[in-house]
Each structure stands twice: as structure tokens, then as C-alpha cells.
């Protein structure tokens, strides 16, 4: 079974790259096809040891600094990869990787993190956050997204089998593409985290400082609470978020893996306000014995057990979050660290590798027997 990988872009290290790395632990050596590649980010990883093919976007001005400006060209770019030398195409996407062109002799399996959120379920929110609700730039963006959705729907028809990273995303796949998706939760290095003593008195959140992560909501809530909050992460929203933040909120910027393990292992609770596809950091927090206070929508509903490993609040507003924090202050001692850690263990890497390899082998066998690859 000769496998070729397709990945949107290798420009940051995040959840989708962790999925790719874990899949390579099953199937490497295997070539990777990606729009843009920054090798310095992946030094020492299994990804860096593979043959990586990039698109013409890699050569365009500014693509290494901000590849997203070339979104209108990405559908064209992904279709230029020649995947003819593989029996199985395994794409890993949250944007366009599923849009490669397979042949009738190949089977195409797509591990989907989310149908492009800026084009589908968060389209109007992205327009608001970018200040693109009115005017010429707004209409240009809306036209581009309209045609992107048309392309995206056609690209979904090139996939034989979808694998979603959560039940929440499986529902989004059905909503966008009217296609079923089997759920295989992504790998989390839960063994790298552990509870530490003594626990300290601060709350923590870890995220890229971008609008959809809703760090602004967390800042506003803790501006009206007396408890210390540590915010780990960098991003374009940093200046705006720090402008009026009170002294009980500490912006810590980027932190090393060792420091993150220490911070989570000693925190009182992890705070989360985004609607995420799956959400790796809440699982990492639980692996460190840290209860999670999260907005009860999206993948986090599948990883946090309300009342047992955390609290899920029901409105994406700062009063709702503040109320949940006050509730935690009253009941936080009732959470059992052992149960929190055991819950995180459900999402370990060995489970992911077993489930993914069994799925690929099963679909490949069915394809060989019948010649029918499609769900």
C-alpha cells in the first residue's frame, strides 16, 4: 500500500501537524505534498525527515510570512500536485488539502479538522471580526468566499472517505458537504503531562491570540473577578487585549513545552471560550489534573465531562464565564484529579494510531475487493 500525504501548509506547529506527525509514525517514509513549507519550524520532527513537495505559492512574495493572503490561489495550487504514484491518498485538511485530483485507481481518505470555518459556519463572524461587514472590500471578500464554497463542495466529492476529529466536526461535514464522516479523535501526548504539588491559585488559558479564540471574553470576565489569570500565547490581538487588562491578568507570551507542563500542572483551572473543532489544550490540561471551565459548544463537549472534569457554561458571554468561575470557586475541591487524568487518557496517541491504521486498512481492503471506494 503506497501512501502519499497531503497537508494544507506546514507553516506552524499546531493540532493538524500533530495529527500528521502521528500518522507518519504509522506510514513513514511517505512523501508529503503541501502548499507552503517552513522547514525550520519542524527541525527534529518526523515531518522534517520526509520528502516534502511544495506548490507554486511557496515561491510567491510574502508567502512565508503570511501564506493566507494567497487563499484565492490555493484551490488552483492544490490541484497541481501529481498524486498518480500512490495507491492511497491520505489528506489532512482544514482548508484545501482534500482538493487534490485522484484517479479511479486510487482511494482518497481525508482526515478533516473542519470544513474551512471562514467559508462555512464562522463566515459571518470572520467578516465582523475583520471589519468587513460593509464596503467594497467586504463585497470582494464575500464574492471570493462564495466561489471558494462552490469549489470546496466540488472538492469534497473527490474524497472517498471522510474521517472527522470529533462528532461536532462530523456534523459540520454533513452540513457543508452532505457526506458522512467516521470519528477518530486526534492524538494528544497525555503522557507528557502530570499533576504537580502544590497546586497554585491562578487560572490559565493557552491559545493563539486571534479573534475566534475569544480571549477578549476571558479578559473581560477576569477584569470583573478578583482571581489571577495567566494567558499564554502570542498573536495579532495582543496589543488590543493588553490595552485595558487589569493587574490580575498576566500575558506570558510564548512558553516552552516544559514551562507549559509546569503551568498546567500547578494551575487551579483551565479557562476556555472558543468554539473549537476538537481542542487539544483542554485535554492537555486535564492530563495535568487541571479542571476545565469551557464554553459548552463544539468539540470540548466531547472531551470535558460536565461536573466531573470541568464546568461547561452555556452562553459565549463574559457574564456566563464569570458565573462559571464563581461556581468553580465554590465547588472546585469536589473535582477528583484521578478522574480528570483518566478522562484525558481516552485521547492518547496509541489509540489514534490504532484506530487510523485499522480504518485505512479496512477501506483499502474493501477497495481492492470491490473496486468501490466511496462511502
Image (cartoon, grey):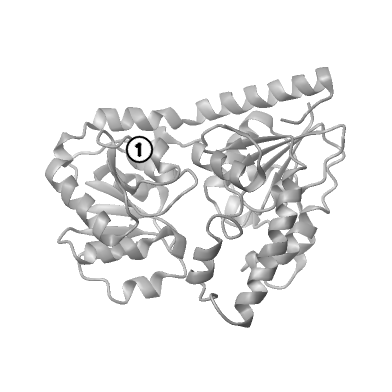
Residue sitting at x 33%, y 27%: 342
Q: Is 174 on the left-hand or right-hand side of 259?
A: right
Residue 43 can be seen in this image: yes
Nearest the viewer among 307 and 65 is 307
Number of numbered callouts drawn: 1
Q: Is 69 on the left-hand or right-hand side of 125?
A: right
* x and y percentages locating residue 257 in the rendered image: 41, 48
Q: Quadrant of the C terminus?
A: top right
* x and y percentages locating residue 311 in the rendered image: 27, 43
* x and y percentages locating residue 45 in the rendered image: 59, 43
Mark 1 secondary-structure assignment: loop
**Image height of 99 relative to 335, above or below:** below
Q: Quadrant of the N terminus?
A: top right
Nearest the viewer among 64 and 213 is 213
The residue at which mark 1 appears reads as 304
**Image height of 234 relative to 163, above or below:** below
Residue 290 can be seen in this image: no
Residue sitting at x 82%, y 50%: 81
List the single residue furthest toward the top: 369
List the single residue furthest toward the left: 330
Circle 1 packing at 10 Å, graded few (<14), some (14-19), many (20+), is many
Residue 55 found in image quarter:
bottom right
Residue sitting at x 20%, y 59%: 228
Nearest the viewer among 104 and 119 is 119
Residue 27 found in image quarter:
top right
Nearest the viewer among 185 and 321 is 321
Amino acid at each position: 500500500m503506497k501512501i502519499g500525504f497531503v497537508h494544507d501548509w506546514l507553516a506552524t506547529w499546531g493540532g493538524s501537524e500533530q495529527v500528521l506527525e502521528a500518522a507518519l509514525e504509522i506510514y513513514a517514509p511517505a512523501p508529503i505534498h503541501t502548499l507552503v513549507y517552513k522547514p525550520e519550524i519542524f527541525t527534529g520532527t518526523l515531518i522534517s525527515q520526509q520528502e516534502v513537495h511544495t506548490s507554486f505559492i511557496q515561491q510567491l512574495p510574502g508567502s512565508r510570512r503570511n501564506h493566507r493572503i494567497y487563499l484565492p490561489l490555493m484551490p488552483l495550487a492544490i490541484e497541481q500536485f501529481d498524486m498518480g504514484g500512490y495507491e492511497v491518498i491520505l489528506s489532512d485538511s482544514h482548508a484545501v488539502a482534500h482538493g487534490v485530483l485522484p484517479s479511479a485507481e486510487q482511494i482518497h481518505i481525508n482526515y478533516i479538522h473542519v470544513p474551512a470555518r471562514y467559508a462555512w459556519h464562522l463566515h459571518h463572524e470572520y467578516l465582523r471580526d475583520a471589519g468587513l461587514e460593509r464596503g467594497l472590500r467586504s463585497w470582494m471578500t464575500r464574492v471570493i468566499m462564495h466561489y471558494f464554497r462552490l469549489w470546496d463542495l466540488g472538492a469534497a466529492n473527490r474524497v472517498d472517505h471522510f474521517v472527522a476529529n470529533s462528532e461536532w466536526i462530523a456534523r459540520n461535514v454533513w452540513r457543508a458537504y452532505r457526506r458522512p464522516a467516521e470519528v477518530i479523535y486526534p492524538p494528544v501526548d497525555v503522557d507528557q503531562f502530570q499533576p504537580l504539588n502544590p497546586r497554585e491559585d491562578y487560572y490559565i488559558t493557552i491559545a493563539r491570540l486571534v479573534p475566534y479564540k475569544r480571549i477578549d471574553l476571558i479578559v473581560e470576565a477576569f477584569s470583573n473577578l478578583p482571581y489571577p489569570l495567566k494567558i499564554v500565547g502570542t498573536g495579532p490581538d495582543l496589543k488590543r487585549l493588553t490595552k485595558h487588562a487589569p493587574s490580575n491578568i498576566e500575558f506570558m507570551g510564548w512558553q516552552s513545552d516544559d514551562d507549559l507542563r509546569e503551568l498546567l500542572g500547578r494551575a487551579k483551572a483551565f479557562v476556555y471560550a472558543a468554539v473549537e473543532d476538537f481542542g487539544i489544550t483542554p485535554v492537555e490540561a486535564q492530563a495535568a489534573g487541571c479542571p476545565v471551565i469551557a464554553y459548552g459548544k463544539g468539540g470540548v463537549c466531547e472531551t470535558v465531562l460536565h461536573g466531573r472534569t470541568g464546568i461547561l457554561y452555556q452562553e459565549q458571554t463574559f457574564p456566563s464565564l464569570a458565573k462559571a468561575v464563581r461556581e468553580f470557586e465554590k465547588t472546585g475541591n469536589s473535582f477528583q484529579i484521578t478522574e480528570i487524568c483518566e478522562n484525558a487518557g481516552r485521547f492518547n496517541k496509541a489509540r489514534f494510531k490504532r484506530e487510523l491504521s485499522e480504518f485505512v486498512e479496512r477501506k483499502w481492503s474493501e477497495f481492492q475487493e470491490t473496486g468501490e471506494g466511496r462511502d
